[in-house]
Image (tube, rainbow, N blue to C red):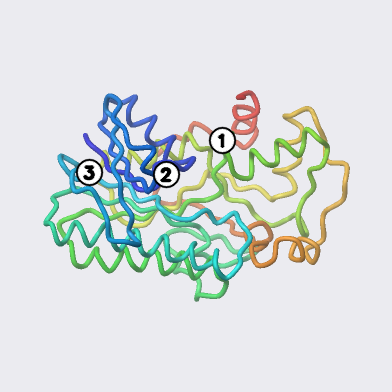
Amino acid sequence: MKLLITGGSGTLGQKITKLALSKNYHVNILTRNKRLLSNTGGLKYYHWDPSLGIIDNNCFVGVDSIINLSGFNVFCYWSNKNKSKILKSRIESTSFILSQIKERNIKIKSFVSASGISAYKDSLTNVSSEDHGVNIPSSFINQVVIKWESKVRDYEKILPEISFSILRVGLVLSNSGGLFKISKNLSKLFLLSPLGIGNQWQSWIHIDDASIIFLRLIENDKKGIFNLVSPNPIIQEDLLKKIALFNNSKIIFPNIPAFIVKAIFGEMSELVLSSQKVRSNKLKDYNFKFSNIDEAIKDLSNKI
């Protein structure tokens, strides 16, 4: 099996790559950074720049499936410039790679694209699954996800011979970055506090499970929409308390009011103040390594 991965330098991309190589897959990674261009065993890097229409055609040779993770990091201050980067980087890269497949008549079996659970309504009470429709575009990140998925679906109609799947990824818990690492470090300084009311739902997944599921969908030729979340979501306040507990700390400060969070983080605050309680009806046959939040946090807390 040979994979081509866009966004392979990110936290999830690196984990998927490591797992794929351990299974003796060959992995090609597209990167804008020319300094990363190298070949090591089954891992090869190829240069591309979707904004300039540049791609090394050799990246497609022998490839069976493509995993699309490319996109500017959403955890930044949402200035107009950064919001443009967040949206454009996803739409542009997805459209470019798929247009190249069509124009060059590249024969691949499957195309797996990341998305996000922000497709669903912000709610403290609703439970969303793949059977529910996406939210009518409201917030910025909601619009990004919907437009990103729409681009994939456009090409699904154009390239019916390819198996397309969209993975709406929840909160990925990883020791290499993201909310868990930040919360872990803050807890060690006794500076961790819930944001807003604290009872907003966090639909999470351990990075090990996330990477396994990405590859399993390819191996089993699955298609459609999948929610990449564990079976047991948790409210934010309880999640942060558990992170502190497993790192020999505790939360000593009260919740930070939503208006202060918004004043500090601006529009980006919706990432930590919104609530999505999500389940996956299509992953019921998958045996999660970490379905219990305590086990997930313990595993990550014990890693350097």
* Residue occupied by mark 2: 284
Query: Separation of disc 3 and disc 1 at Cα?
Result: 27 Å
Q: Quadrant of residue 199?
A: bottom right
* Residue occupied by mark 3: 59
Query: Is 27 drawn above or below residue 130 in the view shown?
Result: above
Identify the residue at horizontal 61%, vertical 64% (top origin).
Answer: 78
Ranked by sequence position, the earlier of labels 2 and 3 is 3
Identify the residue at horizontal 21%, vertical 67% (top origin).
Answer: 157
Ranked by sequence position, the earlier of labels 3 and 1 is 3
Q: How many marks?
A: 3
Q: Tag 1's secondary structure?
A: loop
Kindly report which numbered mark, 2 or 3, lies closer to the viewer in this rendering: 3
Kindly report which numbered mark, 3 or 1, lies closer to the viewer in this rendering: 3
Identify the mark at residue 176; answer none if there is no mark.
1
Q: Residues within 10 Å of mark 3 (few under 14, many from 20)?
A: many
From the top left corner, tell me how far across and down residue 205 is, in percent: 53, 42
Identify the mark at residue 153; answer none if there is no mark.
none
Query: 7 or 291, which is in the foreground?
Result: 7
Q: Quadrant of residue 36?
A: top left
From the viewer's perspective, is 61 left or right of 216? left
Type of amino acid under label 1: Ser
Kindly report which numbered mark, 1 or 2, lies closer to the viewer in this rendering: 1
Query: Separation of disc 2 and disc 3 at Cα?
Result: 34 Å
Identify the residue at horizontal 43%, vertical 41% (top origin).
Answer: 9
Asked if marks 2 and 3 touch (Cβ < 8 Å), the reply is no
Q: Tag 3's secondary structure?
A: helix
Q: Tag 2's secondary structure?
A: loop
Q: Residues within 10 Å of mark 2 (few under 14, many from 20)?
A: few
Query: Separation of disc 1 and disc 2 at Cα?
Result: 28 Å
